[in-house]
Image (cartoon, rainbow, N blue to C red):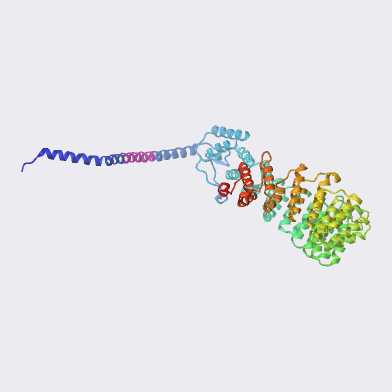
Amino acid sequence: MAFDSSAFVGVASSDFSIIADVLAPFVQEIMALSVFAAAFLVFRCLKQGHGRHQALRKKKEFADNKTAQSSAPTCGNKKHFEGGRPRQPANKNNYASSPRSPPVAAMPPARVQAAESQILQHLEQMEFTRALNLYRSFEREGNEVLFSQDLFPTFIQSAIRVGKLDVVERMTRTMRRVRQTPPLEFWQTALKMLSNRKHYNACLSMAAIFDKQLPCDKTIYSCLINAALEVGDGERASGMLQRYAQSGLNDRDYVLFFRTFVVTRHVDAAEAIFQKLGSGMSPLMLNLLLLTCINAKDPERAHRLLHKAHSVEEGEKIVDTVSYNTVLKGFSQDANHDKCFEVLHEMLEKGFEPDNVTFGTLIDVCVVDQKSGTVNNVASLLTGRGKHMNTVMCTLFIKALVRSNSLPKALDVYEQMKCNEGAHPDIVTFSVLIKALVEQHDLEHALQLLDDLVKGGLAPDDIILTHLLEGCRHMANLELGKKLFTDLTENAEVHPSEITLVSLLKLHGRCGANVDAFELVSTWEDKYGFKPSVIHYTCMMSGCLRAKKYDQAWLAYELMCKRGVTPDETAISTLLPALVSAQHWERVLCIARKLLTPPVRMKVPEETLNVALSQMTAAGPACKRQADQLHELMREAGMHVKVRISKRSA
C-alpha cells in the first residue's frame, strides 16, 4: 500500500497546532514561576552576604572600642566614671529593678553638652515631647549616663508637670544607678509637686528608690507621710515618723504624728506626744488624739485626756466643741448613755454650744434608748439658759427628732419648752411640728398647736396655713379648710403664697368642688395680687378629670389660654389622654392644632395622638373629617403615624 506523506504532514501540523493552543497558558505560568524562583535565590544570597558583612563590622567596632576605653582619660568624676562608663555597684541586688544599659560608645563631650543644652531648651520652651525624644536617642545607646547632674532634676520636674509619671520613675532610677545625689531643693520641689497633684503612689515610689539616702528634711517627710496616709498605708507612715522627728520640728509640726496614730490606733504613743507637748497642743492635735482613743474603743481614756487638756490650757484654748463631740460619739457607740449625758453636762458648763454633730449624736441616743426620761433629760439640759440660742437649739433638736421618725419624743421636747421661760417655742418650732402632725394625719393635734401659737402671741404665716390645708385635704374636710383659709387670711392677715393656692386647689379637687375651684382661680389675681400659673390650672384640671367632669376641665383649659398662660407638657399630658378617652374629638383637634402648628410646635405625646387617630378611624364615616385633619396635622409635624387613613376609610 502506498504511503501518502503529504496527508500525514497535514494531519500532524493540525494536531501540533491544537496542542500548542492548549499548552500556551501553562507555558506562561511556568515561565513566571521560574523567574520568581530565580529572583528569590538571588535575594537570599545577597542577604546572607550582607549579614556576614555586618557581623565583621560589629566585631571590628567592638575591638576598636575596647582599645579606646583602655587608653581614654577619665570622663567627669573619677569616683563615678572610669573609661567613659559608669562603675557598676558592688551589690547588684540593689539595682535589680533597673535595666542594664549597653556598653557606652565613645562620644565627644562637646556633643553631649550640646545635646544637654538642646534638651534643657526644649524643656524651658514647654516642648516636653521633643526633649524626651532627644533624651531617648541617647538612652538607646546607653549614653544617658553621660549627662550632667543638672539635667535629671529639671527633666523630672517637667515630667511631673505634664503627668508623665513613668518618666519620673525611670529617670529617678537612672540617677540612683549612676550614683548622682540630687540636691535638697530638688526633693522638696518634686515631692510637693507630686503631693499637690495627688500622685501619692508616685511620690512614695520616687522616694523609695533612694530610701535612706533621702535628706532628713521636714518638708520631704511631711509629703511622704501624708502620701502614705492618703493611700491608707498607716504602717509605712509610722515607719517614717522617726526620721521626721529628726528634721527639727516645732510644736505645730507634730500634727502628722497624731494623724498617723488615728490610722494605726497607737494610743500609747499618741498620749506620750501629748504629755511631751502639754500646752503646746493645738485643738486639731487634741481632737486627733481623742479620735485615736475612740477608734481604739477606749472612750474612758478619751474622757480622761479631755480633762487633762483643760488642766494644761494656759493662754490659748486647746479644747473646743469638736473635742466634746468626739468623746460624746465614743460613749454613744459604746451604748453608755449615762456617760453621754455626763459629757453633755460638762460641755454646757464649760460654755460650749452644741452644734449639728452634737444633735446628731443625741438623736442616736434618744432613738436607741426607749426610756421617756432620756428625751426629757436632753430637753432640760437645752432649756433654762440664754433665751435666743436655746430656742434655736431646741427647735433644731425637734427637727432632728422628726426626721428620725421620733415625733412623740419631739412633742415631749416641745412640752418642756412650754414650761420653761428661757426657751419658748417660736414660729419655726410650730411649723416643724404642725407639718409633722399633718403628715401623720393627726389634724386635731395640729389645730391644738395652732391655738398654742395664737395664745403665745405669735402670728401664723402662709407656711403654717399651707400645712393645715394639706391636713384638711387628707381628711377631705372642705368646710374646715375654707374656714381656716378665711380666718387666717382675713383675721390673721396671712398673705397666701403660690404653694398655698396649690394646696387649696388640691383640697377642692379632693372634695369634688370643681366649680368653686374655677371661681377661686378666676378671681385670685384680683383678690391676692398675683396671677395663677400653669401649675395651678393643671391642678384644677386634674381635679376635674379625677371626677370625670370633662366639660369643667375644658373650661379650665380655655380660661388658662384666655388669661395668656401657655400650657406646658404636664398640662397637655394631663388633659389630652382624658379627652381621647371621652372621645371629645373636636377638643382633641383643637389642642393638636394649637400645639402642632408653627410657631408653637410643643412636644405632644405621640402615642396619645395615635390612639386618638385609631379610635377616630374605627368610628367610621362619622369621624372621617376629624381623622383626616388629625392625620394631616401629625404628618406635617413629622410625627410617626401608625394608622393608614386611606385604606380604613375605603
Q: Please provide percent x and percent y for residue 323.
A: 81, 56
Q: Nearer the viewer, residue 281 or 459?
A: 459
Q: Nearer the viewer, residue 414 or 607?
A: 607
Q: Residue 397, can we see it?
A: no
Answer left or right for 490 relative to 154. right
Answer left or right for 90 relative to 431. left
Q: Nearer the viewer, residue 124 or 520?
A: 520
Q: Quadrant of residue 507?
A: bottom right
Q: Please provide percent x and percent y for residue 486.
A: 88, 52
Residue extending furthest toward the bottom: 371
Residue extending furthest toward the front: 622
Q: Please provide percent x and percent y for residue 411.
A: 86, 61
Query: Any magenta on residue 45?
Result: yes
Q: Nearer the viewer, residue 394 or 464?
A: 464
Which quadrant would the N terminus be assigned to in this image? top left
Q: Quadrant of residue 393?
A: bottom right
User: Magenta residues?
Assistant: 35-52
Q: Please provide percent x and percent y for residue 521.
A: 81, 48
Q: Residue 368, can we see it?
A: yes
Residue occupying image coordinates x 24% and y 40%: 21
Q: Is residue 39 above or below residue 553?
A: above
Answer left or right for 642 relative to 580. left
Q: For the stretch drawn in magenta, what is the main secondary structure?
A: helix
Q: Is residue 57 above or below residue 463?
A: above
Q: How many marks?
A: 0
